[in-house]
Image (tube, coloured by chain):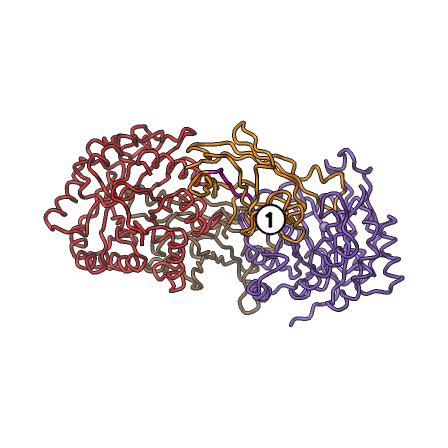
Chain colours: A purple, B orange, C red, D brown
């Protein structure tokens, strides 16, 4: 087994290929594509990319490891959800939420993932999590330890780093002293240019964090979504200040994977995402030096 | 592989019971990028040309099990995955004759990680496809 | 094994899906599609649809029969070629042509096909076959008998039924008395409306045969390419007089498969061919009553 | 699955020999509906932006074997099938630096069942694709 060198490393979220998956690309094609860009880290979304989820077949699990080996890929992050509004008219109880978590811990562990992107149900426009989140996360900690996984809510726009929510997460980590809860930073929170959706009715006013604020939070960050909107022909991202972000990561010797996550304007067009991810990987290689 | 559209052309056919044609069916894929737990689904409506078929005339077949909307509402642990075609079964005695039809389908679903406001918006575009009954 | 009823029966050539094959559809998807239209007869092109041709793996051959059974399909016609201009600057010898034929007889037989669409090399604009065709076809007859196959050159526009070439084929059959050489009629020879290609430089003047001429030739016809250009929303073919063709087939009690072959204007668009083939199958069902 | 274009994006990379970068390569699929016997192929030319690479600088890798154009002209029994990606290897000491390139490729082939006139026309459109070298 190859040992990763410390520092920021390149990876890709299979979510980027949502427009192609099942239609023009199979999982194998996507992994081949990622490998061909020289990226090694991999994020899958459990619900999206595991056939027969939440009961993958043994044959598929075997195939999974064959593919990782074939394409020299590292299973970095496993996306999953606590679907608080699973049933119409009520929220999940703490017990039900815990059961949902533990079910995914087992699958993630079986597939070789340590970092989980744990999406919690939210109750408002700034994505405040459900009121009982601390209860079921607390209850899940012993299971997370048992299955060797770290739950990481994703800090995603329109949330900002200076929000009460992030503060609460960090206090929870400090108070519990847990190594099984942390953060995933989606670089969309640094987006400086507006998108059409920012002016939609019901949305909070457009705000974003500055990369220079990130250092303070990095000790809690296990993984980043290297979100991007559009890569130019010059291999520059047009919406998010990547150079400044990478500077901060390097200044703090942050160690982990940057997972390219395409969320641009042409997600339905076959092949478009692949080209954009490839451009993004070329940019990351330039910025992080490998 | 799946067809890009939600409504697939393969699988559009009449359905029989005890030798009688009792309706028609077609298959769809999930355009929502993470699939759905069956209980996230809200009841579907189908239109064939101008004729409307309400939720009470529709069942879903997913992973070889057939459900009414009421039954689906209780299934929080059965997942309709991205590679699973769902069959929409519609009651219509006598079925549809040979020809070209405009089929429309509409349903919404909840998505807990997004503001609650979004639950009535997600997936609320109507899926349309012209299909040939052979 | 189901016994086919006599008369004209419905089938599809996988060639129709050329724009989708390998890109948006695998062979299994195409066979599922054909089955869903209620067609039972199948044509494949050896060079196109047999992975690792001319050396298909045992695993693939096994899979082939699994798919035929799964989708209740009959292997009707196997398309293959004598590539007379295989090497630059010279034509294949009689021995080389024979070897090419026999190689395909073996594969076709292994896959359950009896009828071969045998494409010969041609020497001019009206598709006159190479001069030594009788020699290598004659030499191939004992092998055709051994492998239980019938070689059928395709009578394809701009060739017409009243051409010297068709006359020669029939004389060959009569003189040899063989049951291993016959004709495939491509209904494109009955096309009454011009296409843009008919006005291309170098093409002979636009001519077509009439369906009413077909009866005379039917005793030699093992299979037909139900060529079509465009199916309307009313499920009518716009270029080729299908009702008259089917009348002649029925009048002569012709027994065999009509293989839908889409060769219209939108062959590259994903899904277009499938929709057109489905319309064509609906029309055939209306015309031949099943 | 294959990408629709002849020139695929996957596989565009520099090539090494004895630790030196000696050129670049990319993969293509056959757009001709029945594939090709290697001897049907006529020599290919590649352009990268405005730089031309003639047939003598190009080899083809098909089914894990690498051929010059002269070698291919003799291979009448090796078939480049529709599901087989071919790799086009181009000699260029130092290879290509990171960036976006316009790649063009042209080759023709014989087709014996069509009038001989067609042999110089079939496949004579140039395939073009913009590709990213990472
Ligand atoms: Mn994200
Ligand atoms: Mn034909």
Q: Is residue B24 magenta?
A: yes
* Horizontal relation, residue A158 to residue B126: left or right: right
Q: Where does the image place residue C2, in percent across and percent down from the top left?
A: 31, 51
* Horizontal relation, residue A256 to residue D58: left or right: right
Q: Is residue B11 magenta?
A: no
Q: Nearer the viewer, residue C127 or C144?
A: C144
The residue indicated by pointer 1 is A275
Q: Nearer the viewer, residue A275 or B15?
A: B15
The answer to whether residue C81 of the structure is visible from this angle is yes
The answer to whether residue D69 of the structure is visible from this angle is no
Tell me the SS state at disc 1. helix
| Magenta stretch secondary structure, dominant | strand
Asked where in the image residue A150 lies, by quadrant, the reply is: bottom right
Asked where in the image residue A282 lies, by quadrant, the reply is: bottom right
Judging from the image, mark 1 belongs to the subunit labelled A
Q: Residue C127, relative to residue A15: is it above or below?
A: above
Q: Magenta stretch? A: B22-28
Residue sitting at the far left: C175
Q: Nearer the viewer, residue A136 or D78?
A: A136
Q: Where does the image place residue B56, in percent across and percent down from the top left?
A: 60, 37
């Amino acid at each position: 087994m190859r040992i990763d060198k410390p520092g920021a490393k390149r990876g890709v979220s299979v979510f980027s290929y949502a427009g192609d998956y099942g239609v023009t690309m199979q999982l194998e094609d996507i992994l081949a594509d990622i490998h061909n860009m020289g990226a090694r880290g991999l994020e899958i979304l459990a619900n999206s990319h595991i056939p027969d989820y939440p009961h993958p077949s043994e044959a598929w699990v075997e195939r999974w490891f064959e593919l990782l080996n074939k394409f020299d890929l590292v299973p970095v992050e496993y996306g999953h959800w606590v679907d608080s509004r699973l049933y119409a008219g009520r929220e999940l109880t703490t017990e039900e939420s815990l059961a949902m978590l533990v079910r995914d811990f087992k699958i993630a562990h079986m597939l070789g993932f340590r970092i989980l992107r744990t999406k919690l149900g939210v109750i408002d426009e700034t994505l405040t999590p459900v009121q009982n989140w601390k209860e079921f996360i607390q209850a899940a900690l012993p299971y997370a330890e048992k299955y060797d996984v770290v739950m990481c809510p994703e800090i995603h726009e329109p949330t900002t780093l200076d929000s009460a929510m992030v503060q609460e997460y960090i206090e929870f980590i400090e108070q519990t002293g847990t190594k099984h809860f942390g953060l995933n930073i989606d670089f969309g929170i640094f987006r400086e240019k507006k998108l059409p959706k920012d002016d939609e009715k019901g949305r909070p006013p457009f705000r974003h964090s500055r990369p220079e604020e990130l250092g303070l939070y990095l000790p809690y960050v296990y993984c980043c979504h290297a979100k991007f909107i559009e890569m130019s022909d010059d291999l520059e991202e047009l919406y998010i200040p990547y150079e400044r972000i990478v500077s901060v990561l390097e200044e703090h010797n942050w160690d982990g994977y940057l997972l390219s996550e395409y969320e641009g304007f042409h997600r339905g067009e076959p092949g478009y995402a692949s080209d954009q991810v490839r451009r993004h990987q070329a940019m990351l290689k330039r910025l992080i030096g490998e | 592989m799946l067809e890009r559209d939600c409504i697939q052309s393969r699988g559009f056919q009449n359905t029989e019971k005890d030798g009688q044609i009792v309706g028609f069916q077609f298959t769809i894929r999930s355009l929502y990028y993470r699939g759905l737990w069956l209980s996230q689904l809200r009841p579907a409506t189908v239109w064939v040309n101008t004729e409307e078929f309400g939720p009470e005339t529709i069942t879903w077949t997913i992973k070889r099990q057939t459900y009414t909307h009421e039954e689906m509402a209780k299934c929080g642990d059965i997942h309709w995955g991205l590679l699973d075609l769902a069959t929409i079964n519609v009651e219509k005695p006598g079925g549809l004759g040979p020809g070209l039809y405009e089929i429309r389908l509409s349903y919404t679903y909840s998505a807990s990680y997004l503001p609650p406001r979004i639950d009535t918006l997600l997936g609320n575009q109507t899926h349309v496809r012209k299909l040939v009954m052979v």
